[in-house]
Image: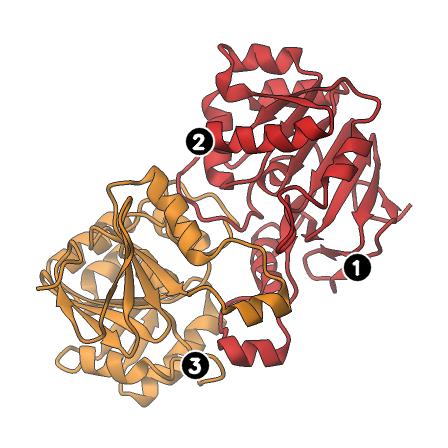
Chain colours: A orange, B red
Amino acid sequence: MKLLLISNSTNYKEQYLGWCMPLIAEFLKNEKKNILFYPESYDAYTERVQKVFKDFGFKVTSIHKAKCPVEAVNKADVIMVGGGNTFHLVSEIHKYKLIEPVRRKVLEGTPFLGWSAGSNVACPTLRTTNDMPVVMPESFDCFDFVPFQINPHYIDPYPEKINDAIRHGGETRQVRVEEFLAVNQEITVAGLREATALWVENDRITLKGERPMRVLKFGKKPCEIKPGSTFDFALNLR
Amino acid sequence: MKLLLISNSTNYKEQYLGWCMPLIAEFLKNEKKNILFYPESYDAYTERVQKVFKDFGFKVTSIHKAKCPVEAVNKADVIMVGGGNTFHLVSEIHKYKLIEPVRRKVLEGTPFLGWSAGSNVACPTLRTTNDMPVVMPESFDCFDFVPFQINPHYIDPYPEKINDAIRHGGETRQVRVEEFLAVNQEITVAGLREATALWVENDRITLKGERPMRVLKFGKKPCEIKPGSTFDFALNLR
């Protein structure tokens, strides 16, 4: 299995897909250049992605243009899922009955990459998304390539000075993840900060990017994994 | 119908339920003093709420202690739902089959009040919550007392200077609500800012608190309703 699970497409005030395109190009350097893309929304989104990928020598085809989405998956060289509203994305994936075809294809070795919502769907379910539940999908189940849940765009509490300025009284991200852990005690959460990604090859995972990843487990003190570290599917260092 | 739908229990660095207890006391001043409470979580939460309400002369009984929750609803003088994780709350409400009993009771005139998630459940569905989908409820449907969706804790974009300090690249709340409107074009969203509440008597709604409310409709420019204004269920001023 070969996965690249990216926290976010774009850093604050940077170009679209700016920070992660070199990483994506490295991930795909020995692969065919045709990518089957699953966009959360349709034409405009796909065109935006196609434009960036074209400069790196890739041809991106959107599944929403395919006559038969399952056949498009079966023929794909690389499968890629973009960000957007996770509930809408998962709702569409179920509607077109793509969970099993994509899962089988990726377990057989077809590279998969995604960012933001596209990384969330690599997990057992969508239950650690930050998005608004704008539609109810048939199920919260996702592709289940990895046994843990990614929380993309993981963000630390703001410093006191900033909180005082914005008078922010809402839950921190860690509190939200703890709510998840309270009712899903057996599942580990990987808090994937901006400009980081998980590079998965078979059962070996490497943290890419410059920031550490926060690992949250029920009843345990959160811990940090350093960038560049290699670990297993239980998020234990190797 | 008599509802008090509160954005948030507690303002930044203030006491628990500090800002809203005088408003709640005013809302309930001609009502019986026994409140049936639906806590998102259990004993500790209930005790915290009981303590505050006791000082104002109210007796709060939690539904999670009732032998038969439906019977407890049928006998209630006042129904109150606290904040917490909306998915967990709605999941439990469906599990105990309380949608219809509570809806009937409140439409018959029993006062209902809620804050945060407790205001969200007064709407047709939970689809404008800010919470993490930690569990999948049987349905996203809620009590449907009002025909619009409340987004509690509505927050405006941070000023540029703050964004630069935190390098915040995520969606603003307005963008998230626009994602909701894109797939729910017929539903209006009430962006209820901190320290505000909707006081509903029959078909007349008054905005309480010191801040305006943001009204978001598909394909229209958002507009603001001033504090103290009275409006109807379509959120048009009267």
Q: Position of residue A185 (x, y in %)?
A: 28, 40
For residue A200, which quarter of the picture? bottom left
Q: Are marks 2 and 1 in contact (CB under 8 Å)?
A: no
Whether residue A102 is situated above or below residue A218 in the rendered picture: below
Indicate which disc, 2 or 1, sits on the residue closer to the N terminus.
Answer: 2
Question: In screen coordinates, is A227 left or right of B152?
Answer: left
Q: Residue furthest bottom?
A: A55
Q: Are marks 3 and 1 in contact (CB under 8 Å)?
A: no
Q: Secondary structure at mark 1?
A: strand
Q: Position of residue A47 (x, y in %)?
A: 43, 77
The residue that disc 3 covers is A16
How busy is the neighbourhood of tag 3: few (under 14 within 10 Å), some, or many (20 plus)? some
The residue depicted at 30 percent of the width and 75 percent of the height is A211
Q: Secondary structure at mark 2?
A: loop
Question: In screen coordinates, is A91 left or right of A181?
Answer: right
The residue depicted at 37 percent of the width and 45 percent of the height is A180
> Which amino acid, by three-letter code, is at mark 1?
Glu
The residue that disc 2 covers is B138
Alpha-carbon span between mark 3 and mark 2: 38 Å
Q: Position of residue A117 (x, y in %)?
A: 38, 61
> Which amino acid, by three-letter code, is at mark 2?
Glu
Chain on which label 1 sits: B
Is residue A155 or residue A17 the one in the foreground? Answer: A155
Q: Which mark is residue B108?
A: none
> Which amino acid, by three-letter code, is at mark 3?
Tyr
Do badges 3 and 1 share one subunit?
no
Q: Nearer the viewer, mark 3 or mark 1?
A: 1
Q: Which mark is residue B224?
A: 1
Number of numbered discs? 3
